[in-house]
Image: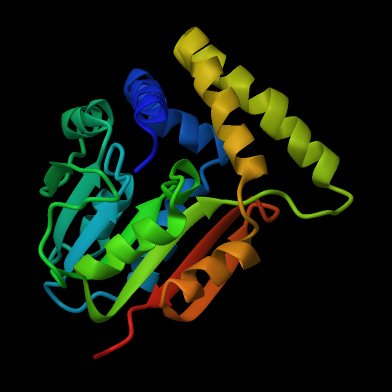
Amino acid sequence: MISDERAARVQGMFDRIARHYRLLNTLMTAGRDRRWRRHVVDRAALPREGRLLDLATGTGDIAREALRLRPDLQVTGADFSTGMMQAGRRMSDAAPMHWVAADAMRLPFADERFDAVTSGYLVRNVLDIPGTLQEQMRVLRPGGRLVILESSPPAPSPLRPFIELHLRLVIPLLGRLIAGPEGASAYRYLPRTTQAFHTAQELAAIMQDAGLTAVTWRRYMFGTMAIHEGVKPPR
């Protein structure tokens, strides 16, 4: 998925903040994160008793929301951070889902197994975005949907200096207050990856180049979050 050295560093970072990850996400987004997860599940447009793969599942928040909204679903959550998944399994509202340790570039699933593939904050952490999209399409049935929740660099606007101040100072401060020095370090890294990542339009173009059709996106939180969706073409 990413270079071995960087993979180990990022994996260790997520393992260390796993216990506080959900709380920090809620604080950083003023509670909007759950609404975004609902949108992700809605846009996946799963059939009854459909199979959902949630990549970079972390503590299983998107997967958990999917099962809350659609108890009939068969949900698999996959992540390369076993610490995050262990934290998710210990939570009081842990969902009846399958947890799988997996590399997003080499998914341990058969071709065309899932009706939809979702991910939250995955693609900004991989070096080969087209490669991971192709791997997701491999395990997605024809006509199935791929839905991505991802941060996006703030667009030029009068609010941009305040948004950047929030990213550079407020978020690391929250990380330190909740999770100590490790939290501050992690939540300096995460805003940096947001500011350095592709714009929503650029990510949409990468999805189209990977072969997805009907690609659309919608921005949230002053343009710093976006939900993208695309469809694997039918045979």
Horizontally, is 96 left or right of 82 in the view? left
Direction bottom: furthest residue: 235
Tell me where residue 85 sits by quadrant: top left
Q: Nearer the viewer, residue 134 or 32?
A: 134
Residue 94's x, y, as percent?
18, 39
Residue 132's x, y, as percent?
35, 56
Query: Which quadrant is the N terminus positioned in?
Result: top left
Q: Nearer the viewer, residue 30 or 75?
A: 75
Q: Nearer the viewer, residue 13 or 39?
A: 13
Direction right: furthest residue: 158
Horizontally, is 155 left or right of 2 in the view? right
Residue in the image at 17% along x and 33% along y = 89
Residue in the image at 49% along x and 9% along y = 180
Total labels: the figure holds: 0
Q: Does residue 101 lie above or below 90 as drawn?
A: below
Q: Does residue 39 lie above or below 235 as drawn?
A: above
Q: Nearer the viewer, residue 100 or 183?
A: 100
Residue in the image at 52% along x and 48% along y = 32
Horizontally, is 52 left or right of 56 in the view? left
Residue in the image at 21% along x and 48% along y = 77
Residue 176's x, y, as percent?
55, 13
Q: Does residue 27 lie above or below 68 as drawn?
A: above
Residue 19's x, y, as percent?
32, 22
Q: Does residue 20 lie above or below 63 as drawn?
A: above
Query: Which quadrant is the C terminus positioned in?
Result: bottom left
Q: How is the image coloured?
A: rainbow
